Amino acid sequence: MILDVATASIIETVSAFALNARRALEVLPPAQKFQLTQPRWQWTPKSDGEMVRDLWDALNRIIHAQKLDVGFEELPQNVAVIAEGALVVPYVRAATDRKKLAFIDPFALSHAFLYGAFPLLVGVEKSPPSQGVH
């Protein structure tokens, strides 16, 4: 089924992203925090579970997950551009040996990394080499 293929692809992608993003974050001070505040879709979980709001926590949960699954939700008709509705992936759920199953928004995850952490990693304002007078 197509959702099985999509699920496998999403888990592979989010896992690879989490591993590499976490490695990159290791060069920043441990006190530096990035919040998951920019979801692509407005949604609320239909089942119990905490919403992970911290980038480091979310990345760790994905990397160390003993259970990792993908949530599919149908978009409301007034938002969907596909006849008969459209499915989106508003979250992945991860549980580790130390933490219960929790919701992680993959869009908010990537946004926090790309717009919060990444600019600090590459140094947004790099000054040009000095042009000394000879």
Image (cartoon, rainbow, N blue to C red):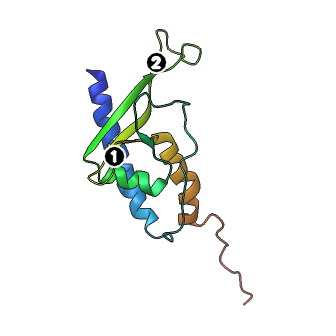
Locate residue 6: give its quadrant: top left
- Residue 22: horizontal and vertical position, in percent? 40, 59
Front position among marks 2 and 1: 1
> Residue 58 appears at what percent x and percent y?
42, 51
Q: Is residue 87 above or below residue 113?
A: above
Residue 85 on image: x %, y %: 47, 13
* Residue at the outermost bottom position: 134
| Residue in the image at 59% along x and 67% along y | 123
| Side of 133 where 40 appears, left or right | left
User: Can you tell which mark lies on residue 128?
Assistant: none
Corner quadrant of residue 132: bottom right
Q: Position of residue 40 (x, y in %)?
A: 55, 35
Q: Residue at x 31, y 24 (%)?
A: 3
* 80 sits to left or right of 60: right
Q: Seen from this angle, which residue lies furthest top?
A: 84
Q: Which mark is residue 100?
A: 1
CA gap between label 2 and label 1 equals 30 Å
Sequence-wise, which precedes: disc 2 or disc 1? 2
Query: Who's the residue at 25% across and 20% down the image?
Result: 1
Question: Which residue is pictured at 33% across the width and 46% down the height?
Answer: 100
Q: Is residue 70 above or below residue 116?
A: above
User: Foreground residue, 121 or 56?
Assistant: 56
Q: Secondary structure at mark 2?
A: loop
Quarter holding the C terminus? bottom right
Q: How many marks?
A: 2
Residue type at the position of mark 2: Ala
Q: Disc 2 marks which residue? A: 86
- Picture layout, residue 103 above or below residue 47: below
